[in-house]
């Protein structure tokens, strides 16, 4: 008879893999926006990185992007697309932060070893608790981060194409 007992650390490893998935896709999203900023500012990647790596908040990144888009006279359709991506990014970043910045602990629940996220928040008073592994929420957040990354990559491609259209030398 085969042993069907689940590996006690499999959920833990799965959790860590999903945290990595969320963090990696969101970082790729930020990098795509950085690339758009560098192209709009006519700055090569290494020099541009000296600036954009210091930008923490997604809203600040998009303020820079939007200002440069206006300076470079990008079409209104691209402004609307950037605004839509920003709106999604603000919502997604709240979920991303919840999973990426919450320490993971193992607890015994009903005799099983399970991963628990340490949830801390200050809402008048400090709330500090262990909450269950939220696999479905994490999968949705990973999918949202991947979607954001893809949308940012497409936006960057459109910006580069518009710069080339505006200037035969490639913007």
Image: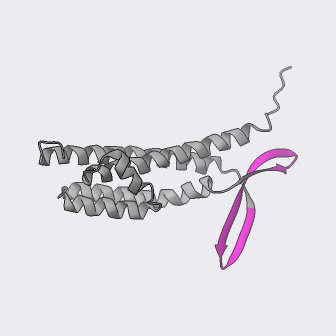
Give coordinates of residue 20: x percent, y percent: 59, 43
Magenta residues, dominant SS class: strand
Task: Say which residue appears at 66% left-offset and 57% top-offset.
Answer: 102
Give coordinates of residue 35: x percent, y percent: 34, 48
- In the rendered image, which quarter is residue 8 located in? top right
Position above or below: 80 against 8: below
37 in magenta: no
Give coordinates of residue 49: x percent, y percent: 40, 50
Q: From which residue to which does the magenta span run?
A: 106-129
Q: Is residue 91 visible?
A: yes
Image check: 142 left or right of 148? right
Count of numbered labels shown in the rendering: 0
Front residue of this view, candidates 41 and 68: 41
Front residue of this view, candidates 100 and 145: 100
Image check: 93 left or right of 86? right
Q: Is residue 34 visible?
A: no
Task: Say which residue appears at 40% left-offset and 53% top-offset.
Answer: 50
114 in magenta: yes
Task: Say which residue appears at 27% left-offset and 64% top-offset.
Answer: 67
Give coordinates of residue 148: x percent, y percent: 42, 49
Kindly give the residue lying farthest to the top in the view shown. 1
């Amino acid at each position: 008879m085969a042993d069907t007992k689940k590996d006690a650390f499999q959920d833990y490893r799965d959790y860590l893999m999903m945290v990595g998935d969320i963090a990696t896709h969101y970082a790729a999203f930020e990098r795509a926006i950085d690339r758009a900023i560098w192209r709009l500012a006519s700055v090569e990647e290494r020099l541009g990185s000296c600036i954009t790596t210091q930008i923490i908040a997604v809203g600040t990144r998009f303020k820079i992007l939007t200002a440069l888009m206006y300076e470079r006279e990008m079409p209104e359709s691209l402004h609307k697309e950037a605004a839509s991506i920003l709106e999604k990014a603000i919502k997604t970043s709240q979920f991303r932060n919840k999973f990426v910045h919450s320490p993971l602990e193992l607890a015994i629940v009903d005799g099983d070893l399970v991963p628990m996220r340490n949830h801390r928040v200050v809402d008048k008073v400090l709330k500090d608790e262990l909450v269950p592994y939220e696999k479905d929420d994490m999968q949705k957040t990973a999918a949202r981060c991947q979607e954001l990354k893809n949308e940012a990559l497409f936006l960057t491609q459109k910006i580069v194409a518009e710069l080339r259209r505006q200037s035969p030398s490639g913007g």
